[in-house]
Image (cartoon, rainbow, N blue to C red):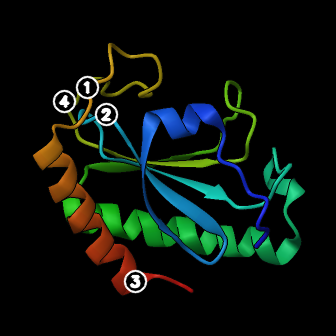
Amino acid sequence: MTAEFVLHKQLAADTHPLLDLELSRVLLMDDARFPWLILVPRRDGARDWIDLAHAEQHRLLDEVEVCSRALRAVVRPDKLNVAALGNIVPQLHVHVVARHAGDAAWPKPVWGVGERVPYATDALSARSKELLAQLTGNAVR
């Protein structure tokens, strides 16, 4: 890991940090409408998956699995969406979004749907604790 890692300002503004896995910083998107984790590999200059070393690509996939399983255990979604877009935020990051039939965007993608609903303080604390319990129990470190 590089000590020089800096999280993109948009990601920092829109999320709450949960923990660092071996490669990635795991963030909780501050939108209570959608249970949503974002993994950001701590590699400066990485914009696309192929900017990571081969072993890091596999590590990131393992970490996406850990986050997916944590979300599934905590919120029991109908579907898990995994995506790495980067059209607005160029820093490599992977979205893991738990979807429920009938959520605010269903069945469309979550991006650009309505206004973000920030977590209330108590709800943020509870959701973070639930996810951390799952993430630390299943983490590949």
What is the CA distance from the residue labelled 4 to the residue labelled 3? 29 Å
Secondary structure beneath dot 1 equals loop
* Mark 4: few/some/many CA within 10 Å (<14, 14-19, 20+): few
Closer to the eye: label 4 or 2: 2
Closer to us: mark 4 or mark 3?
A: 3
Do the CB atoms of the residues marked 2 and 3 lie less than 8 Å apart?
Answer: no
Are the residues at dot 2 and dot 1 in contact (C-beta closer than 8 Å)? yes
Q: Which residue is mark 2?
A: 31
Label whose residue precedes the other's in the sequence (4 or 1): 4
Q: Mark 3, residues whose alpha carbon is within 10 Å: few (<14), some, or many (≥20)?
A: some
Please say if the residues under marks 1 and 3 sit with CB atoms less than 8 Å apart. no
Asked whether, in this view, residue 85 is left or right of residue 99, the answer is right
Kindly report the distance in space between the C-alpha atoms of the residues bearing marks 4 and 2.
Answer: 16 Å
Give the residue at mark 3.
Answer: 138
The quadrant of the rendering that contains the C terminus is: bottom right
Nearer to us of marks 4 and 1 is: 1
Rendering coords of residue 75 (x, y %): 20, 56
Disc 4 is placed on an element classified as: loop
Residue type (three-letter) at the residue carrying disc 4? Gly
**Mark 4 near mark 1, Cβ–Cβ under 8 Å?**
no
Mark 1 sits on what residue?
117
* Position of residue 77 measured from the top left corner of the image (x, y, whole percent): 25, 52
Outermost residue to the top: 114
